[in-house]
Amino acid sequence: MNNSDIISKTITFVKEQLNNAEGGHDWFHIERVYKNALLIAKEEVCNLQIVQLSALLHDIADSKFHDGDESVGPKVARRFLESQNVAGEIIDAVINIIENISFKGGNFEKKFSSIELDIVQDADRLDAIGAIGIARAFNYGGFKNRVLYDPKIAPNTNMSIDEYKKSQAPTINHFYEKLLLLKDKMNTETGKKIAQERHQFMEKFLSQFYAEWEGVK
Ligand code: ADP
Ligand code: NI
């Protein structure tokens, strides 16, 4: 099977698997990450097949929906790639990326690094910021029944960490905990440039949001 056959089979498989996925991790998220990964890959020296397969398979089984079990996604991906007779070293490279891509992983020392991981991680992070990132955050907050914003549970209050964790933090807080930090975590030059623009858009969104909250705009 040539690469474009493998990619189209993978697309079909991922669409099927994510049929009932929640809004933040549905097929359209994968499609955006895939497109962004291809865009970034154009400027880098990399193995395109590894980039394509990892972008398509990176959220195949989110641990949030498997009792925090981080091993389900890599297992499902490996089984699928083996069934398509993909070369062993390509499978290993893809699985390493899937295991190391999440933001959580980003807070620890990276166990594995490759240009293809850098690319797909940037593409995934780009989808968490800008207009789409804002939409995904409020979608997630709604799914968890969180309030949009609460000035009493704002990031800069004197609340203790324990109190804060129990408080079902408002969605706006997620911007300070994750979204506004992502621009400084980008790996590639292309990723950094796009992230900068999306970051500015979020800053603008937040200042408009606070202004409207006070009723002055
Ligand atoms: P990733 O796709 O990088 O693995 P997550 O699974 O952590 O990211 O989150 C999926 C989407 O939901 C992202 O857009 C993220 O910003 C958003 N999200 C995650 N946690 C929260 C939260 N506590 N409040 C609002 N949005 C969140
Ligand atoms: Ni993702």
Image: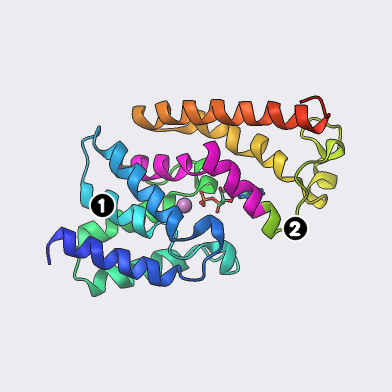
**Bounds of the magenta span?**
116-140
Q: Which residue ends up furthest to the left in the rendered image?
A: 2
What element does badge 1 sit on? Answer: helix
Q: Which residue is mark 1?
A: 50
Residue at x-position 77% and y-position 31%: 212
Amino acid at pointer 1: Ile
Please tell me whether mark 1 or mark 2 is closer to you in this view. Answer: 2
Residues at marks 1 and 2, CA–CA distance in whole angstroms? 37 Å
**Residue 122's x, y, as percent?**
41, 39
* Contact? badges 1 and 2 (CB < 8 Å): no
Amino acid at pointer 2: Asn
Q: Is residue 107 visible?
A: no
Q: Above or below — where is 6 with respect to 188?
A: below
* Label 2 Cα crowd, 10 Å radius (few <14 / some 14-19 / many 20+): few
Q: Is residue 47 visible?
A: yes
Q: How many marks?
A: 2
Q: Which residue is mark 2?
A: 145
Is residue 52 toward the left or the right of residue 144 in the image?
left
Q: Which residue ends up furthest to the front in the rendered image?
A: 217
Residue at x-position 54% and y-position 66%: 69
Residue at x-position 45% and y-position 67%: 18
**Residue 71's x, y, as percent?**
47, 65
Q: Is residue 215 magenta?
A: no
**Residue 174's x, y, as percent?**
67, 41
Q: Classify mark 1 as within 8 Å of ligand 2 or not, answering yes or no.
A: no
Is residue 212 toward the left or the right of residue 54 in the image?
right
Q: Nearer the viewer, residue 201 or 90?
A: 201
* Label 1 Cα crowd, 10 Å radius (few <14 / some 14-19 / many 20+): many
